[in-house]
Amino acid sequence: MSGAGRRRNPLNLSIVPPTVNENDETEPAPAVREEAEGPSLDSERFQRLELTEPQRQRMIDWFNEKRQVSGGLNEEMLEKICDLGHGNGGVVSKVRHKRSNTIMARKLVHLEVKAAVRNQILKELEVLHRCNSPYIVGFYDAFTDQNDISICMEYMDGLSLDIVLKKVGRIEEPLIGRISIAVVRGLTYLKDELRILHRDVKPSNILVNTKGEIKLCDFGVSGMLIDSMANSFVGTRSYMAPERLTGSRYSVESDVWSFGLSLIELAVGRFPVPALTRQEYAALFNVPEDGIELADGREVPSSVQTPVTASSMSIFDLLEYIVSEPPPTLPLKLFSNEFVDFVTSSTKKLPTERANLKTLALHPFYKMYAEVEDSPMFASWVQKVMEQEG
């Protein structure tokens, strides 16, 4: 790999993502501004959520909070508190709504586009007003200020799982089980209720808070915004399914691949492409190298003096690896058989062989955690993580 930086693009892989409606299984639901202040609590769509009582109360609190900032937002109404990080093509900040004192997360996206394009993006983002689920980050409003688009969302004080992972090294399987339930239910809500595919599942787009909630953010609701930000998505290509990288039809199974890849990353503490070596597994889990065994009879890569990591590979080498090499998985014995099979079924190379959301919801690993709602264990864990420095 010493010449990785000089490699071309032998497989003719595309870095720029396809437009939202190209080769897609679903399209976003019509963008309408109904329920901008939250749906009626006795509406049919709200009842279909099948909430626990604590979830229902948190949703009611959210609707009431959103009503406090109803009527539209603009730059003068917000006070910046601090930067939280960088999302796809934008900076995310913690802000305060001056009139109501509501704390929000504001994503600021700078776009050198015509006013008509910015207005179309705002129109497409209005579908987020209809997106009300305990597994999807809440949406307040969006507005433009010159060439900037601001998307104001619910503030999750535990931040994103990529930040959490940097603090804790790796996440234990029972916690990943809780995360898995929330992500599968969030993706299912987007697909079934709004006809939306996420398109960018990864740890940085899974948010947690000290209430124990786990929510998805940054999903592809606006085709115009995705098109306008196409060049900003280069860094997220590493989570994309092989069929996306080769320009084939995009479906919910593509989101499932990204989800499975993310779970492996949370479990081992690093992006799992290229595959971890015996030496890495042995050091991570304090076990003998000869005790490492992968599912499906796959061979574990031999240890090398200087392990190759994603950060040391060129983008095209990394994408070629995803398309050409065996898909990532987890070692047996170090994790439960149910968890290993769950991620292995999520990262099958061919989408026709890969699990979908319905089959994941029937999987034994999913069922192990499906009834563990409102677990204080997860909330307590997030609180402890937030107390750590760094």
Image (cartoon, helix red, strand yellow):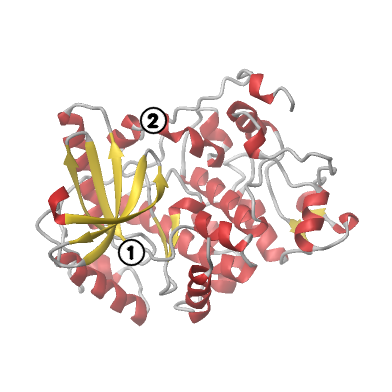
Q: Position of residue 292 (x, y in %)?
A: 83, 56
The residue at the point 41 percent across, 50 percent down is: 85
Q: What's the residue type where badge 1 is placed?
A: Ser
Judged left or right of residue 77, residue 332 is right
Residue indicated by mark 2 = 230
| Residue furthest left as drawn | 71
Q: Name the N-terminal-most of marks 2 and 1.
A: 1
Q: Nearer the viewer, residue 115 or 251?
A: 115
| Residue furthest right as drawn | 290
The residue at the point 31 percent across, 75 percent down is: 58
Residue indicated by mark 1 = 133
Judged left or right of residue 50, residue 242 is right
Q: Nearer the viewer, residue 384 or 225?
A: 384
Q: Position of residue 218 (x, y in %)?
A: 37, 48
Judged left or right of residue 261, residue 107 is left
Q: Nearer the viewer, residue 366 or 330?
A: 330
Judged left or right of residue 232, residue 9 is right
Residue 387 visible in the shown view = yes
Q: Quadrant of residue 200?
A: top left
